[in-house]
Image (tube, rainbow, N blue to C red):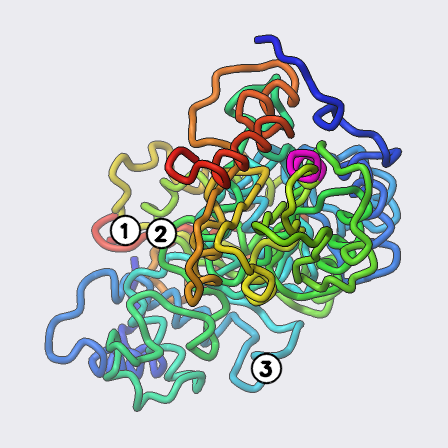
Amino acid sequence: MNSQPRSHPLRDRAIELIQLMSGDEKHDASATSTLDVLVVLYDRVLNVSPATIGDPTRDRFLLSKGHGPMAFYAVLAAMGFVDPGILPSFGAYASILGRHPDRKLVPGVEISSGSLGHGLPIAVGLAYGLQTRGHTSAGARVFCLIGDAELDEGSNHEAIALAGRLGLERLHVVVVDNASATYGWPGGIGARFELEGWSARTVDGTDRDALEAAFTAPHPGRPHVVVAMIGERAS
Amino acid sequence: MTSVIAPSDRPRAASPDSMRERFYRIAPTLLDTDPNIAIVLADIGTDAFDAAAARHPGRVLNVGIREQLLIGAGAGLALAGYRPILHTYAPFLVERPFEQLKLDLGHNDLGAVLVSVGASYDASAAGRTHQAPEDVPLLSALPGWRIDVPGHPDEAEALFRAAAARTDRTYLRLSELSNRDAVREVVDGAAAGRMTVVRRGRGATVLAVGPILDQVTEAVRDLDVTIVYATTIRPFDGATLGAIVREPEVIVVEPYLEGSSAPVVSEALRRQPHRLLSIGVPLTEPRHYGEPAEHQAAYGLDAASIGRRIRLFLEQPDEG
């Protein structure tokens, strides 16, 4: 079903940059499961750049699933937020590029994350606050990336329920689903959001056109979730 | 349990309202005067903000009974440029979402004002689930928090107004207990986070924190000691304490977990020989209900009990 060429300028550049961090060793799944999602967001969806990172009406991308941030750092470097020259320092004591990202250290990183279940509640408050500040009517949107196993954390379910009741139209969640949740989500992840009043799309997480279409689908009066299937389930 | 309650240990009503009532009266008016203020609630205190929420749509957010979200959403509001004020009962504000305090606010370096009610054994009849005398030491274990423990509604109002105007992370701990009179330096802001000497003596130094000052004053009425009063307990004003202490005996009376400030007192006095007596809520698993005054007496925090412990400490060092 995914017949697109693997090659894409930002994706290819990001792969090169990931190798600056991972060296010759083969990077594990957590490093690249988010790659196509990040490429589509930063290349085609998000209205944010190094020049606009201080603009209150910019789009915000919140990486809640802070594990395996190499793809994120690589995309930030390719987009000009981070000097590619520092990528080889990944994980070193004095590096700004830790194994979980720190917003105080890395330009373009909106939240510090690592412990699971923190990004989505912050995203709810941020989307709500941007709305009441008038920044969403000027364009600002919030995108939050979480993982299917991260959904185990109950804090997400506090946030999913409230966002649905508030109808936070400018809030977007992408769940990268590589079937890593220990007990799974019978009936599907999208259905859980829909029950709480969200708009939901489930797509192949490596199909960039499908991802773009899902991210930009209209969802008036509702928050929107895109479940991006990765790995065996997506093929 | 029966107990004889001394006059100074009765709930005092010199102020016509409680700290909590004062907060519910003042906080809505801040929404009118400061466009940066946003209120986040978790089903506690919502009635007080109904009118203000109608005047300021979107600036009062009730998240329901979801305390992790209370802190997380508050951090998000801070990212959106607001000065968020987060409010609920102490155990649900500090203990349940402790990691959110550490990460969403602390590690992300975002500002907020946390306003708790239900200090220590205020919710005496509700039992252990609604009591958190360990809130202060818990927050003391995180860097960068200011902790205010007002002793009177006028002090609470002044500390709240000041906190709302800052950008830091402040925990404002409101209590149903109150001293008869407010300390002027706290109300007019002259204290500015520093300790205030309320009585000078030649002997030991007694530090009283927040709403326990009246009991302490009564307890040492016949002793020639200095009484120092603190409402801002973190950051700890060790400079003032170190400058005041002359005799080696130092007594700290805190209306929350006993010994909470022992490490910072020890650090402040590290250059001078001293003996420290810590008085506070003992480390126990309470299984009693009843009135706050009964808990106060059971924990030895009434004036007579505090006086006995201080005398023993001063007169019989081997026993006290």
Which numbered disc flags the more N-terminal residue, 2 or 3? 3
Which mark, residue A147? 2
User: Is residue B86 found left or right of A111 in the rendered image?
Assistant: right
Distance Cα–Cα, label 2 vs label 3: 28 Å
Amino acid type assigned to the residue bearing label 3 in the image: Thr
Q: Is residue A6 visible?
A: yes
Amino acid type assigned to the residue bearing label 1 in the image: Asn
Residue sitting at 54 percent across and 46 percent down?
A: B252
Classify residue B316 by image quadrant.
Answer: top left
Confirm or deny contact between disc 2 and disc 3 (CB under 8 A): no
Q: Nearer the viewer, mark 1 or mark 3?
A: 3
Q: Which of the chains bears the disc numbered 2?
A: A
Confirm or deny contact between disc 2 and disc 1 (CB under 8 A): yes
Q: Nearer the viewer, residue B145 or B189?
A: B189
Q: Nearer the viewer, residue A208 or B299?
A: B299
Q: Position of residue A58 (x, y in %)?
A: 61, 73
Q: Which residues are magenta?
A: B214-220
Residue tagged by mark 1?
A: A178
Do the residues at discs 2 and 1 belong to one chain? yes
Residue sitting at 70 percent across and 46 percent down?
A: B150
Classify residue B214 by image quadrant.
Answer: top right
| Rendered position, A15 above or below A35 | below
Residue tagged by mark 3?
A: A52
Circle 3 residues within 10 Å: few <14, some 14–19, many ≥20: few
